[in-house]
Image: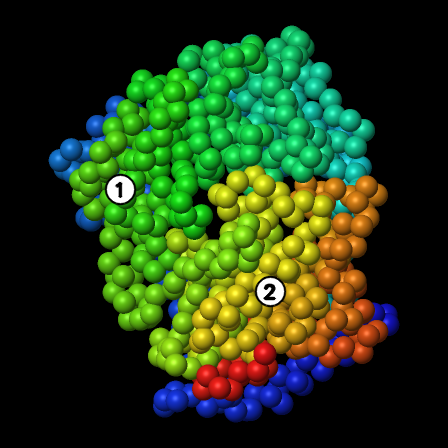
Amino acid sequence: MQSSLKVVTYLFAAALTFATNTDHTAAQSTDSQPTSTTELLEKSRPRLEGIYANGEMRAKDFRAEWLLDSTGYVVREKAIDSGDSVQAIYDVVTGERTVATSVAEITSRDPMLSPDGTSVLKKQRRGWDIRNLTSGETRPLLKPEEAGDIHYQDLSWSPDGKRILFVESNSNEVRLRNVLVPDDPSYPGVSKTRFARVGTKIPELRVGVVDASGEDVHSVTWLPIEFPKDGGYFGEVSWAGNSEEILVERLSRFRDKREFLLARVDGVVSTIFEETNEAWAVGSHGINSGVKWTDGGKSFVFLSEKDGWRQAFAIDRDGKNERLLTLGDYDIIDRAESGDVVDEDGGWYYFYASPDNGTQRYLFRVPLDGTGTLERITSKDQAGWHSYQFSPDRKWAIHTYSTVNSPPVVDLVTIPEHRSIRILESNEELRTKVRKIITRPTEFVQLRLSDEVTVDASVTKPSNFDESKRYPVFVYVYGEPYLQTVLDRWGAAQIDFLRTIADLGYITVSIDNRGTPAPKGAAWRRSIFGSLGPLSTEEQAAAIQELGRTRSYVDLSRVGIWGWSGGGSNTLNALFRKPDVYHLGIAVVPKPQPHLYNAWFQEIYMRTPEVNAEGYARSAPLGFADGLKGKLLIVTGSGETNTHIQIIEGLVDRLIELGKPFDYMVYPNRDHGLREGKGSEVHVRMLITRCLLENLPPGPRPLSTQTQ
């Protein structure tokens, strides 16, 4: 009860603080722009509503499927006369449009449909049924006999359609969390949800095969693939090119060991590849996971960072004759789109990379025979971010190209010449809008922190920027291993919001420190292993100092930082550990107590407190809260299912104990994205904007006014 009173009291204090500051005057600008917080907020509101409520900066997608014979592509459209949905077929050469009179044979296929097209798998609560499409007969296929949390996932038909492969996930020993259900305000209900916290029991997994036509629907063959007592995970689980063998990718609990197992349905299991890494073999984004079979199932291609870069290797089915396909010191950013990665007829392996610029992405290919000749497919005059959807014969591709400052253009190109045939989606309406809004493009810079470390940063300036003056800086940080924020791609992390803030009179900046998943080598990504927080805090602060040293327009006496999730944690660490660098921090759904976070993510990078107590102590912002000097706003949702509110309340109590002033906003029943409820996304951004304006005055100052 006392903890609840503390929170309520502080919420009231936060609300009162914001209310009394609403009419305070911000720093004066040199032109006739709004100057008070109220005026600046009202200036921002329509733009934020356009972005988050109306999707005005969202580009149009172009959705199409290739015909199996590669002669055209199919677009689902509405008929002009009736408004009915039709399959429009466009000839790949001429662009001529026809309407399909029967279902067109396209490359995508419902994975739940049997190979002969006669039956389909349907999920029913915790189990699965199989339905005959001809007779309509439905019968149970998989149904848990035990009570509790047992689920079946990753179902796939054998090539001959006689068996179904699946993974069983048993969470019965994963601890339950009580969560309030917002029904009756006076007497709310309580639901229970499974939450595998760091160091606790995780779901038990096993692989099964069931006969699709057997009379005993509960007769399952369980493959003899086990985990140690502390558990583990599966990566890819799939049929190994035939109906008798299964490829199972087994990952240790900490993901520092990966094995490819070949299992026969009769129970014989052999190991065909394994790797270990003192940090991790497969990270939380799972890019390295999975295989692509080649040569009729005689070999497969996989990704690994075991030699220092994310590279493609081919290996024979028996685990012998391993060969490197992507020779050279560069990273594969990702495979080409699903199904497009291998062209066996042409003898090519396709992937995305950017050897010279970690913020961009291009299409490359290398020979499948391992000769290592790297060939760039993307045109060299199109710097930015690229995606491709190949035709089955790999002679054509639907190509999407964008930059952080220009919306996507989708065109049809030839492969490998990359000759543009026709524009499929220009996003012209959005481009017209963008020309009015983005009067000063976001810039990319590199900041040298030492002889060994140079980081990428994006910088967005106000539309009325004056290089002869100094501006406050507002940093957007993530800084953890799951994603980059500095990307030359339309819609890159929070860029629309950062532009809105910049036009209020700030320099908005984002920086990718070591430990982010940039294509700069395995050592770059694994440098943070053992403790998320210390290295990112040091390098983010050093980068801001370097930006101020090399750019006279940066006002180091007015620096704010904000972030979401892992970025919220980095915001707390920045404000607590570098109080002389940062003067304001806004932490959205942070995890100030990482030992209370989920096991699936945190254990990859920090193991558990039992084996890495020192790493957890150095990581936790909670332990450095006494360093707070600047203004702090913490934002979360009471309905959080991952970075649950109790992780944050420990920090709230600690700050109260220390007598530190701060503001705390809890959105009722919102989850991690704070999207639930009408107006939530706009309100969150308005809250951040208001806190920034009130505590870090916007607008330029003469060069002589900066204090170090």
Q: Residue at x 31, y 58 (%)?
A: 406
Q: Position of residue 369 (x, y in %)?
A: 39, 17
Residue 9 falls in image quadrant: bottom right
| Residue 641 point in image, percent of width and height | 67, 53
Q: Residue at x 56, y 87 (%)?
A: 22
**Is 219 situated left or right of 119 in this image?**
right
What's the mark number on residue 541? Answer: 2
Q: Which numbered disc covers residue 379? A: 1
Tell me if 262 is positioned left or right of 448 in this view. right
Q: Quadrant of residue 251?
A: top right
Number of numbered markers: 2
Q: Earlier in the sequence, mark 1 or mark 2?
A: 1
Q: Nearer the viewer, residue 551 or 417?
A: 551
Please provide percent x and percent y for residue 458: 44, 61
For the point 60% across and 88% down, the residue is 21
Residue 581's disc is none
Label 1 amino acid? Ser
